[in-house]
Amino acid sequence: MVKIKIIIEKIPDGIEPEIIVKCNEIDDSLWYLIHSIKATANKLIGMLDLQMHIIDPNDVYYFEAVDNKVFIYCKEKFFESKLKLYEIEKLYENGDFFRASKSTILNIAKINSIGPLFYGRFEALLQNGEKVIISRQYVPVLKRKLGL
């Protein structure tokens, strides 16, 4: 097991925060960490009742494209996004998000359980009680994200 030393240093106001990574070798887990930090820094803008809301990506359960619109689903509310699904996928592909179907991008961190369905598809039960179908062509992506 590799020991990791973490140093957190408080900086004065007005100075831009930075993260410095010192390592012997850049592996997949380090890239995952870097992309997760970047994705968390990218706040989402969602529209609800003609108002813009700033949404933390960690609060998102899934994104869904319906009738040429993209919606951001959180625990109890959903918002409309101005981003296209492929743009969202590109922004968050190295974090906890993955394409679950042609119209859905799912947050692995919000999954309670996963069970098989007919024809090689899976069904994910989310922490808010919703169920989302994972198409069979995206099941290998899910397994890779879960380390299976």
Image: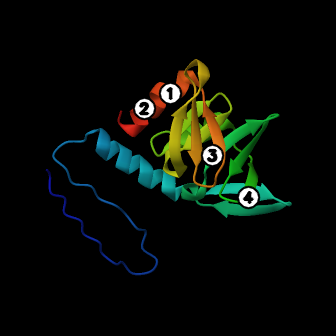
Q: Which residue carries the number 3 mark?
A: 62
Which mark sits nearer the N-terminus, 1 or 4? Answer: 4
Out of 10 and 74, give the one closest to the viewer.
74
Relative side of 48 to 112, left or right: right
Q: Are marks 2 and 1 in contact (CB under 8 Å)?
A: yes
Residue 110 versus residue 140 in the image, above or below = below
Report the Cα–Cα distance between label 2 and label 4.
28 Å
Q: Nearer the viewer, mark 2 or mark 3?
A: 2
Give the residue type at disc 3: Tyr
Give the residue type at disc 2: Lys
Q: Are marks 4 and 3 in contact (CB under 8 Å)?
A: no
In the image, what residue occupies the spot 46% across and 26% down?
140
Residue 66 versus residue 111 in the image, above or below = above
Report the Cα–Cα distance between label 4 and label 3.
11 Å
Q: Which residue carries the number 4 mark?
A: 77
Relative side of 112 to 104, left or right: left
Numbered mark located on residue 94 in the image: none
Q: Which residue carries the number 2 mark?
A: 143
